[in-house]
Amino acid sequence: MQYLQENKTESEGCVFCAIAAGEEDERVLARTDLSYAVLNKYPYNPGHLMIVPKRHVRDLTDLEAAEHLDMQELLARSERALRGAGDPHGFNIGMNLGRVAGAGIPDHLHWHLIPRWGGDTNFMPAIGQTRVLPELLADSYERLKPFFEDA
């Protein structure tokens, strides 16, 4: 709830469009002509990243064929990089379309790629209303960035 209450309003502009334009670049791991991979500012696990089209679109049906292909290729590249950097046991890959579906930024679609490890969750999120992340966002960036250059 804290994230949803603090989330930027539409009048403040789209954070994903700002990143696509080169602003707020410190979390971007890779860029293509049509999309980019960026660490999630509010990760569920270390390495939680998003694949975002550069063009501001709301729904999957709004993407052009080249954008679909580009995002899928970057998603696969990101999976390879995450496997190389941290050897996760699995992944959650998903997209929330619309605020009621869980999208914190509903007007600019994006894929979530979340690395998972056995035992990576515990009672803290349910009981303590907090997440326990063993890695700072800046440390995740430093650990992952070289694997995107090789992926």
Image (cartoon, rainbow, N blue to C red):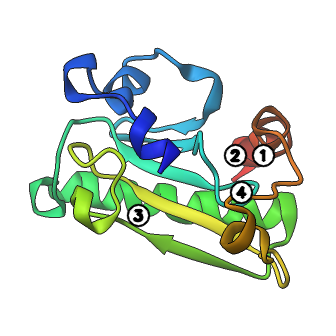
Q: CA distance from mark 4 to mark 1?
A: 24 Å
Secondary structure at badge 3 equals: helix
Secondary structure at badge 1 equals: helix
Looking at numbered disc 2 in the image, what kind of residue is underneath it?
Phe
Q: Which residue is depicted at the point 21% across and 28% down?
A: 10
Is the Cβ of the residue at disc 3 closer than 8 Å to that at disc 2?
Answer: no
As drawn, the label of residue 72 is: 3
Which mark sits nearer the N-terminus, 2 or 4?
4
Q: CA distance from mark 4 to mark 3?
A: 32 Å
Q: Which is more foreground, mark 2 or mark 1? A: 1
Q: CA distance from mark 1 to mark 3?
A: 19 Å
Q: CA distance from mark 3 to mark 2?
A: 15 Å
Q: Which is more foreground, mark 4 or mark 1? A: 4
Is the Cβ of the residue at disc 2 closer than 8 Å to that at disc 1?
Answer: yes
- Tag 4 residue: 130
Is the Cβ of the residue at disc 4 closer than 8 Å to that at disc 1?
Answer: no
x, y (%) of residue 46?
A: 76, 55
Q: Which residue is depicted at the point 36% across and 66% down?
A: 95
Q: Which residue is depicted at the point 72% across and 60% down?
A: 45
- Tag 2 residue: 148
- Tag 1 residue: 144
Q: CA distance from mark 2 to mark 1?
A: 7 Å
Is the Cβ of the residue at disc 2 closer than 8 Å to that at disc 4?
Answer: no
Which mark sits nearer the N-terminus, 3 or 2?
3
Rendered view: 24 above or below 113:
above
Q: Residue furthest front?
A: 127
Left or right, 36 with respect to 14, comes to right
